[in-house]
Amino acid sequence: MNKKVYIETYGCQMNVADSEVVVSILSKAGFVQTENIKDAGLILINTCSIRDNAEQRIWGRLNAISHLKKQKNDLKIGIIGCMAERLKEKLIETQHLVDIVVGPDAYRELPLLVSEAEAGHKAVNVLLSREETYADISPVRMDKNGVSSFVSIMRGCNNMCAYCVVPYVRGAERSRYPESVLEEAKELFEMGYREVTLLGQNVDSYNWVSNNEIVGFPELLEKVAMIDPGLRVRFSTSHPKDISDSLLTTISRYNNICKHIHLPAQSGSSRILNLMNREYTREWYMDRVNSIRTLIPGCSLSTDMITGFCTETEEDHKESLSLMEWAGFDFAYMFKYNERPGTKAARKYKDDVPETIKSERLSEMIALQNKLSIKSKKSDIGMVFDVLIEGFSKRSVEYLSGRTSQNKVVVFPADDFKKGDYIKVLIERCTAATLIGRSV
Ligand code: 5AD
Ligand code: SF4
């Protein structure tokens, strides 16, 4: 078989981290990665199911590559990840060009499944696991900059948010052995990386229990931060119901733990939050934000918001807007509610907010967030930030680009600096997306 594998990744950062594990597993079985889809003997598409449009993109992509299969009849195509888990055998039944279907917990079986496909059988493994964390697998880094990388610390999710497909496609929550996280982060630092992002669906509920030790997320974060003061640590995603003052105190104590928290609110209406099964109220969310502001001065805050969830009224929507305004989010991802088959909301509630209203509310939300994002950037003008350089700016090689601890992108004249350096930058102006300054 042509043992060149081409992998394409859709969806969240967790999928990016998973693709790195997949390449590592396959390389042990003799595969080499190729960047050129036409050279590949095996094409893998790591998929996302979070909203229907994520899946539509993947169907479109499959269509677009179908001609390759006609050109090379020994080419094998595999669908892996969340959509593989959700649709299982149906994927093969509806798409004849798919040979392999593998869910997020079955990647160790990939070499075997590829051999089965080679032998002319369709190969499927979508078993979810209670234990699999791929702790012992050293991911093959695919990031482009060599400065920042992801480290997965847990898998799955035990929160049953009514709208969300994740618990069904990624299974129950399990935490990864802390030593393996530390080793991976140390290794990255030794390779020259200067930033790691610890990933999990709900990092606040990270919990490793062994005979003589319990490690929660604050302890894990601290251990990673102590590897070296020159290694920045980020994490995502936090859940408002679980984010504790103990975590916030840990963040405040270490200069290299980044001062940015992604804390998805989803809605500003307690009634909607209850229907969503988020297990907190508007007041609870506001209390957590107040704690962040008190314990970590200068911390930036971002959110995910869903608009048009079942039964959402104009009043509920206004509450979402007012929460956003009150919190002054630096950044937000905003989505129209999209019913996902099998979720609690799909089974129990009617998707009753008309599409036009969802769109109107989303536009209003985006307009508000644009205003807040600009305000957040303008407030940085005149201040000096520690910036970790990630590479040249997109527009010009005379400028470098990096990030502040608060996760804002900064562009400044390149001088003799290079990626991986930390420098102090005075912010002089900003655009809608970027801070612009000079080193001081
Ligand atoms: N419809 C719209 N947005 C969703 N999200 C998750 N499920 C859905 C859905 N069914 C959003 C949430 C989550 C982010 C990753 O995607 O805001 O935080
Ligand atoms: Fe990530 Fe969720 Fe999409 Fe899976 S369904 S790729 S976990 S966002």
Image (spheres, rainbow, N blue to C red):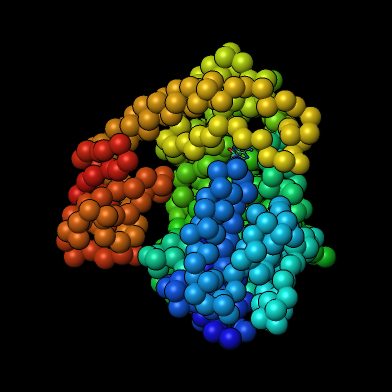
Residue at horizontal 78 percent and vertical 34 percent from the top: 347
Furthest residue toward right: 211
Where is 112 relative to 362, above or below? below
Where is 36 relative to 242, above or below? below
Residue at horizontal 50 percent and vertical 45 percent from the top: 252
Q: Could you say where residue 98 lies in the image, as x and y percent from the top left?
A: 63, 65
Q: 38 or 26: which is nearer to us?
A: 38
Q: 405 or 85: which is nearer to us?
A: 85
Where is 145 relative to 291, above or below? below
Q: Quadrant of the N terminus?
A: bottom right
Q: 330 or 233: which is nearer to us?
A: 330
Q: Could you say where residue 351 lies in the image, as x and y percent from the top left?
A: 68, 27
Answer with left or right where residue 347 lies relative to residue 50. right
Residue 115 figure quarter:
bottom right
Asked whether residue 219 is in view, the answer is: no
Asked whether residue 48 is in view, the answer is: yes
Q: Could you say where residue 343 lies in the image, as x and y percent from the top left?
A: 74, 39
Where is 109 relative to 197, above or below? below
Furthest residue toward front: 70
Residue at horizontal 31 percent and vertical 64 percent from the top: 419
Answer with left or right where residue 141 lies relative to residue 425. right
Furthest residue toward top: 315
Residue at horizontal 78 percent and vertical 63 percent from the top: 127
What is the number of callouts on the image? 0
Q: Could you say where residue 164 lies in the image, as x and y percent from the top left?
A: 68, 41
Answer with left or right where residue 172 lies relative to residue 224. right
